Image: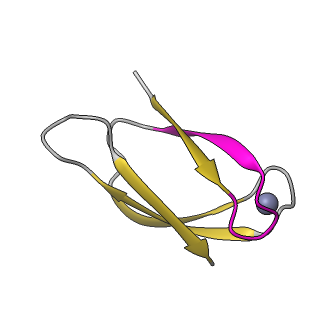
Amino acid sequence: MQDVVEVQCPWCFELVELLIDPETEGHYIEDCEVCCRPWQISVVRDMGRTPQVSIERG
Ligand SMILES: [Zn+2]
């Protein structure tokens, strides 16, 4: 099951729901679905709980 995390875009400041696959961890790049600008996403997992997600301008 995917985790759903609500994040705020660092470019347009819209709140967007981000789906995170169970295997996803570390850093990756994804475009904002609102403004299409790149996010640098950082996912940290702590023993299978809801991941900690932080987003910076990519
Ligand atoms: Zn955006």
Q: Which quadrant of the figure shows ligand 1?
A: bottom right
Q: Is residue 11 magenta?
A: yes
Which residue of the protein is positioned furthest toward the left in this rendering? 47
Residue farthest toward the top in the current orientation of the protein = 1
Decide if residue 11 is on the left or right side of residue 1. right
Which quadrant is home to the C terminus?
Answer: bottom right
Q: Nearer the viewer, residue 14 or 40?
A: 14
26 relative position to 56: left or right: left
Q: How many marks?
A: 0
- Relative to 42, is 15 above or below? above
Residue 9 x %, y %: 70, 60
Give x and y (percent) for residue 41.
50, 64
Residue 54 drawn at (x, y percent): 46, 62
Where's the N terminus, which quadrant? top left
The chosen color scheme is secondary structure
Residue 2, quarter of picture: top left
How far across and how far down the image is residue 29, in percent? 58, 67
What residue is drawn where x is 87% and y is 60%?
A: 35
Q: List the single residue furthest toward the bottom.
A: 58
Image height of 24 relative to 28, above or below: above
Identify the residue at image location x=33%, y=44%.
51
Q: Residue at x 63, y 68 (%)?
A: 39
Q: Which residue is at 78% across, 52% downward?
A: 14
In this rendering, position of residue 36 left or right of residue 2: right
Residue 10 part of the magenta segment: yes
Q: Which residues are magenta?
A: 9-20
Corner quadrant of residue 23: top left
